[in-house]
Image (spheres, rainbow, N blue to C red):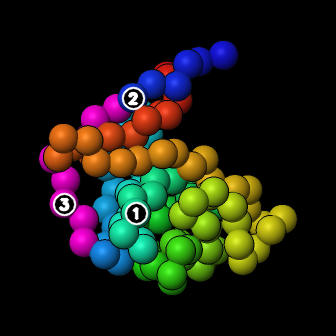
Amino acid sequence: MTEAKKVSLGPVTLGEGEMRGFPVGRRNVLVACVGGRLKAIDDWCNHAGCLLSGGHLEENMVVCPCHEIGFDLDTGKNMTSPGIADDQPAFTAELRDGELVLLDFPGE
Ligand code: FES
């Protein structure tokens, strides 16, 4: 089993309702700012591999641009099409000393 680790994405500014994708190791992570909090889930949609960061936000849900499955930004749960796609891995993101940090990113 791989151990979770802390990963810094560097100085990042995200306004309310904004989201962006970041390459992290061999993965991509979507980070969004909703309700004044940073939220992070795996950016590669497990349905067919599109980047969720190319989609749009609906309150606390990101909607995939390809087939419009929506995932909760806190839990990664598939909110719109259970059985069609799995849930997305979710991570804990926060600002520390001006840098965006993932606190529990899985090791590779
Ligand atoms: S690739 Fe995301 S919904 Fe199909």
Q: Which residues are magenta?
A: 7-15
Q: Is residue 92 among the parts visible in the rendering?
A: yes
Name the kind of residue labelled 3 in the image.
Thr
User: Which residue is located at x 35 percent, y 77 percent?
Assistant: 17
- Residue 37 numbered tag: 1
Judged left or right of residue 80, residue 59 is left
Q: Earlier along the polypeptide chain: callout 3 or callout 2?
A: 2
User: Which residue is located at x 51 percent, y 83 percent?
Assistant: 58
Q: Secondary structure at mark 2?
A: strand
Q: Secondary structure at mark 1?
A: strand
Judged left or right of residue 56, residue 8 is left
Q: Distance of mark 2 from mark 1, alpha carbons?
A: 18 Å
x, y percentage for residue 23? 33, 43
What is the crowding at mark 1: few (fewer than 14 residues within 10 Å), some, or many (at least 20)? few
Q: Marks 2 and 3: in contact by CB < 8 Å?
A: no
Q: Earlier along the polypeptide chain: callout 2 or callout 1?
A: 2
- Pair 2/1: label in front: 1
Q: Is residue 65 among the parts visible in the rendering?
A: no
Q: Quadrant of the image for the N terminus? A: top right
x, y percentage for residue 41? 51, 53
- The residue singled out by tag 3 in the image is 13
Name the kind of residue labelled 1 in the image.
Arg
Judged left or right of residue 86, residue 107 is left
- The residue singled out by tag 2 in the image is 6
